[in-house]
Structure formats: structure tokens, C-alpha cells
Amino acid sequence: MKPAMETAAEENTEQSQERKVNSRAEMEIGRYHWMYPGSKNHQYHPVPTLGDRASPLSSPGCFECCIKCLGGVPYASLVATILCFSGVALFCGCGHVALAGTVAILEQHFSTNTSDHALLSEVIQLMQYVIYGIASFFFLYGIILLAEGFYTTSAVKELHGEFKTTACGRCISGMFVFLTYVLGVAWLGVFGFSAVPVFMFYNIWSTCEVIKSPQTNGTTGVEQICVDVRQYGIIPWNAFPGKICGSALENICNTTEFYMSYHLFIVACAGAGATVIALLIYMMATTYNYAVLKFKSREDCCTKF
């Protein structure tokens, strides 16, 4: 009996408190009507609280969708794609113009006979066509690797519901890993090959700086300082003149073709190095994604059985 009496007393106390609150609210409304008589005809509606309506943050909106989408962005593949496009563009564009300038320098100064450098001209023309193919291939390959990065990142982070992958998808990821490794090794060779013309032009430029130096300027030994491009193997030994000395060599270094070709070869070499770095990032990203996909596929098979 005692607990029942206590609960009844508590209910009466709560009801009395509610009546006090209501009466106090009515007093405030009456006071407002007394101060502003024109407000009696107004209807008052209770203001909905946060508990009566859903909070904007409780339901998924644009912000949550953006965060989810950003979580599926393959940032490593995105950085590698930008670096790859930039490197290939620098290598192909600067290399193409620098090769054309090199042919002009050889024809005007080191090999006046066209038959002596005919083979070199054909090789350079072929390399220019190869540059077009490299630019087109890496443009498509970079887009494909970026798309593959989006797919594997979404699958690894399980952003779209239940994790699902197929043997065909894992096989494609493995193929991209292998192809990226092969292209990375190939571009290491391209990077080393692009450093050869930089070395040649640097030797010519340093020889010109020796001629311009005050220690050798005005002396009889200036005309004995020469550069022989035949020793690099780009033109045959019977090419004429093949060797330029003294003031004639200094005039070559002051030409626009030499200045532009030298700096463009440097930029092309830097572009090849940037492409190598991009392919290394691709290697790490694709290898990691492939390993995680393979591990999760095995884990998914084990849970089924």
C-alpha cells in the first residue's frame, strides 16, 4: 500500500507543477494582451522544438555525400596522373622542338654535306613521330589508371555497400600492375637517353665559356680550343667540317638555336624524370590496391564457407 500511496502523491505533485506552469504562461499572455490590446485577435501557435522535427545534421545531405565521395578519391593515383601528364607533355613538346633545333645546328655548322647527316635526319624524324605516339598513349593510359584507381579505392574502402569483386577485376588490376612496372623500367631508359643530348650541349657550352673567359681571351691559343661532334657518333667521321674551333664556336653558342635547344633538352630531361616518379607512384598505388583486393576476396570466400 505504501508504494501505491507514494506514486499517487508523486503524480499529484507533477500535475500541480504542470498547472502552475500553465497558469504562469496564461498570466504572461494576459499581461501581454493588457499592454497591447490589439493583439487579442492573434492566434498563438506553439513553436516546434528540435525534438518535434528532424535535425538537418541527422539526415544525410550534401555535406555527407561530398565527404563520402572525397573518401573514394584515389589521391595517389590523382597526383600520379597530374605528374605523368605534366612530365610527358614537357618531354614530348620540348624534345620535339629541341630535336628540330639540333638538326638545324648540324646542317649549318658541323655537316654542310646533306648526305653525311641523312641517316641522322631520318632517325630524328622517326623520333619525332615516336614522340607523338608516346604523348597519345600516355594520355589514354593515365586516364585508364585513374579510373582503375577510383574502382579499386571504392572497392577497398567498401563505399558502395557490400564488398564485391570478381576474378576478372582482380586480373585486370594485376595486368595494370605488370604493365606499369614494365613502363617504369622503360622510362628509366628514356630518362637516361634524354640526358645524353644535355651532356653534349653542356660540353659545347662549357667550351664556349672557356673561350669567353679573361684568361684565354685575346691569346693565340683560343683558335686551338675546338669541339668535334663526330666523337659523339651522331655524324660520320668523314663529315665536313665536323670540328669547330675558336671564334666560330663562340658564334655558335651565341645563336638562338643553340640556346633554345640546350634549355629545351634540359626541360625534356626533367619531364622524363617526372614521368618516372609518376610511374613509381602508380606502381605503389596499384600494387597496394591489388594486394588488398586479393586479400579481401580470400577473406570473403572464407566467410561464405
Image (cartoon, rainbow, N blue to C red):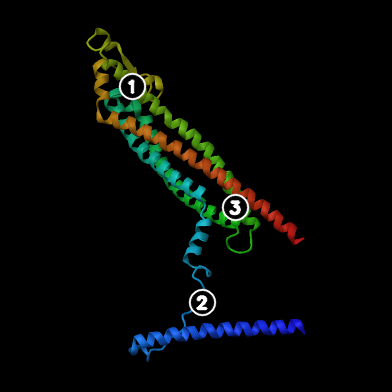
Q: Which residue is mark 3?
A: 172
Residue 252's x, y, as percent? 26, 24
Classify the position of the N terminus by image quarter: bottom right
Residue 26's x, y, as percent? 46, 86
Q: Residues within 10 Å of mark 1 (few under 14, many from 20)?
A: many
> Which badge, 3 or 1, is on the more N-terminal residue?
3
228 or 201: which is nearer to us?
A: 201
Q: Identify the element where label 1 is drawn.
A: helix
Q: Residue at x 35, y 27 (%)?
A: 117
- Going by the image, does 74 lie left or right of 215? right
Task: Please indicate, yes or no, whether residue 46 appears anywhere in the rendered image.
Answer: yes
156 or 236: which is nearer to us?
A: 156
Give the amino acid at mark 3. Answer: Ile
Mark seen at residue 63: none
Question: Which label lies toward us, 1 or 2?
Answer: 2
**How far apart, in angstroms, are the residues tagged by discs 3 and 2?**
49 Å
Placement of 261 over or under 141, stated as above or below: above
